[in-house]
Image (cartoon, rainbow, N blue to C red):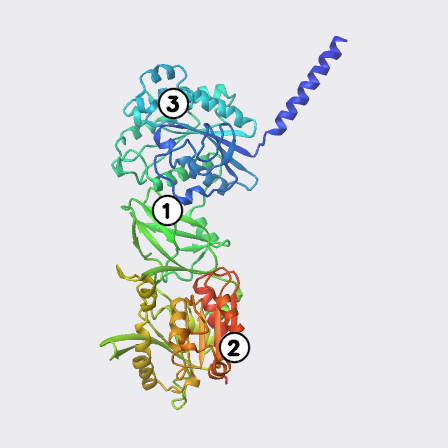
Amino acid sequence: MKKTFFSVLLLAGLFFTSLAASAQDANFYIYLCLGQSNMEGNAPYEPQDTLVNPRFQVLSAVDNKDLGRVKGKWYPARAPLCREHTGLTPADYFGRTMVENLPENVRVGVVHVAIGGCKIELFQKDKCEEYIKTAPDWMLNMLKEYDNDPYGRLVEMAKIAQKDGVIKGILLHQGESNTGEKDWPEKVKSVYESLLADLNLKAEDVPLLAGEVVNADHGGTCAVMNDIIDTLPQVIKNCAVVSSKGLSCAADHLHFDAAGYRILGRRYAAAMLNMMGIKLPTTEDVIKNTVEASSNMHGCDFPRLDKENRAYFRIYAPDVKRLQVDICGKKYDMDKDEFGWWTVKTDPLVVGFHYYFLLVDGFSVIDPMSTTYFGCSRMASGIEVPEGKEGDYYRTQNVPHGQVRTCTYYSETQKRFRRCVVYTPAEYEKNTKKRYPVLYLQHGMGEDETGWSTQGYMYNILDNQIAEGKCVPMIVVMESGDVEVGFRPRPGKDVNEERNLYGASFATLMINDLIPMVDKTFRTYTDRDHRAMAGLSWGGKQTFDITLTNLDKFSYIGGFSGAIFGLDVKTAFNGVFADADTFNKKVHYMFLGCGTEENMGTAQLVKTLRELNIHVDFYESQGTAHEWLTWRRCLNEFLPHLFKK
């Protein structure tokens, strides 16, 4: 009977043990993070640091009212991870890099306890109490959040975490307050062994990663401590040291800045993954699995694109302290290796053309490995993220090719020389007696007369359509439009009035100087039935302003994401829309287009015009915003309708 009773107890114990084990997710990897201010996080975090993959979690070690976190609960690991009023920490980008390089079914969690300015003794069980007695006043409130026992809080939270996942490693960043102490590695060893014992962990399963302090190459105040930190693997077998070489720092040369923390975090992850047998891609791996961007300078291997349209950049700049890639306003910190090469991989980019810059120690420059384009009111780098076969209409094909030439002319209106870009079709040079219709094609704000031929590939679009018989052969003229520098209202002036003046000088110049020069220089038809104008963004506004007040000179009108706002269509442009019948007879074709992902009011304008019985064709580019891919598509739709009346 006794034997049966104990058998039942044994079976019951096994049953409940099994239930407990089933709650633990073997694919939830937990990492303990401890140390002083650089682990705590000293740099202010930025908006990009608050967006995080939900597979990366933090177990809050304290209550955080700012973020609505409760001690002992899991939350998405957005900054700050430590406590209220702390900043970016290496743990932030450690976790992000881990989930990026681990299988989709694996989650990563961090348990984060750190105290700025503390010595390693604060985490030694037998030294903590004595250390707190001598702690400075500014540290007391931080200690109080951990009930004056940061080590105990770390163990308490780690035990909660163990119910949900498996502890896979320990991350330490500490040493500034112990600078010069040669017995520091032994003290770290005692903390490490205490954690293993208290959490029933095995050293071979749970490596320790320790990061160097701000390096001598950035004038690190405590850089001499790195020689001591580097000896840690001699004391702890399953240990690796994470280099701080090349990492940028704050003005105090004691703490890393945000860029430094991001890169340091990725280095922690690279070391941990390496210990797990997972190698981050080498340059050779990247080259093998990606393709050069078509916008690269000839012979340059980078930038590159993978199948998910992530861009890879690689720059050699050994003396630079901080390097970033800025793509359309989103900044990516680049990681510097020991040889002076900086690399980064971006998020997936949407197809189409993107301006970008390199930020070298905060100063914006172009990438020497990319073709340059005039955009953003200056020369800019650009990267072309390719469409599939649907983009062949703007790619070079095996068809007769026209010419794009630069023409210099003198403007009597402005008393200065100006420049325009002119496309002539492939047949123009062959038949010297034939005349051609003209399309005046304008770019947007902050771009110049080269935009349509470089960013827009208009010459390919024309060549391909003419070869296929989709559009008639025509001359295309592109001018700067006096909008190369972005809109800047003069101090003390009415903003709306200033906006109406912006680029307005082009109207007089076009009528008085540009059109006469083109008609004199090229074999054109000079009547309104053979003259069109179209423009993108601010060029769309200029198109409306010029054509609708000069219908004796234009009969085809196009606006691509046109900056045409607040029109009273019944009275605008001297009431040109009030008499629909007259307008429709004069204007052979009017086209308005935009992208589905932008909000330029184009659809509403079309609706309003159609309610007045104005004939207007409308096109929406699916999935694109205020960008060159939208405008290439608009031009492709617009051209077949020109000069066929």
Name the secondary structure under disc 3.
Answer: helix
Is residue 215 among the parts visible in the rendering? yes
Identify the secondary structure beneath mark 2: loop
Sequence-first disc among 2 and 3: 3
Q: Nearer the viewer, residue 538 or 166?
A: 538
The amino acid at mark 2 is: His
Residue 239's image quarter?
top left
Residue at 55%, 38% in the rendered image: 106
State the CA–CA distance, disc 2 to disc 1: 52 Å
Q: Position of residue 323 (x, y in %)?
A: 33, 47
Position in image of residue 269 (x %, y %): 44, 37
Of the two numbered discs 2 and 1 in the rendering, the one whose residue sits closer to the viewer: 2
- Which residue does the numbered mark 3 point to in the structure image? 143
Q: Nearer the viewer, residue 593 or 371?
A: 593
Give the mark nearest the N terminus, 2 or 1. Answer: 1
Q: Nearer the viewer, residue 631 or 268?
A: 631
Residue projecting furthest to the bottom: 433
Answer yes or no: is residue 270 visible: no
Left or right: 448 with respect to 637? Answer: left
Identify which amino acid the numbered label 3 is placed on. Answer: Leu
Relative side of 295 to 471, left or right: left
Which residue bears the numbered disc 2? Answer: 615
Badge 1 is on which residue?
Answer: 334
Camera-side mark, 1 or 3: 3
- Among the 4 quarters of the image, the one containing residue 149: top left
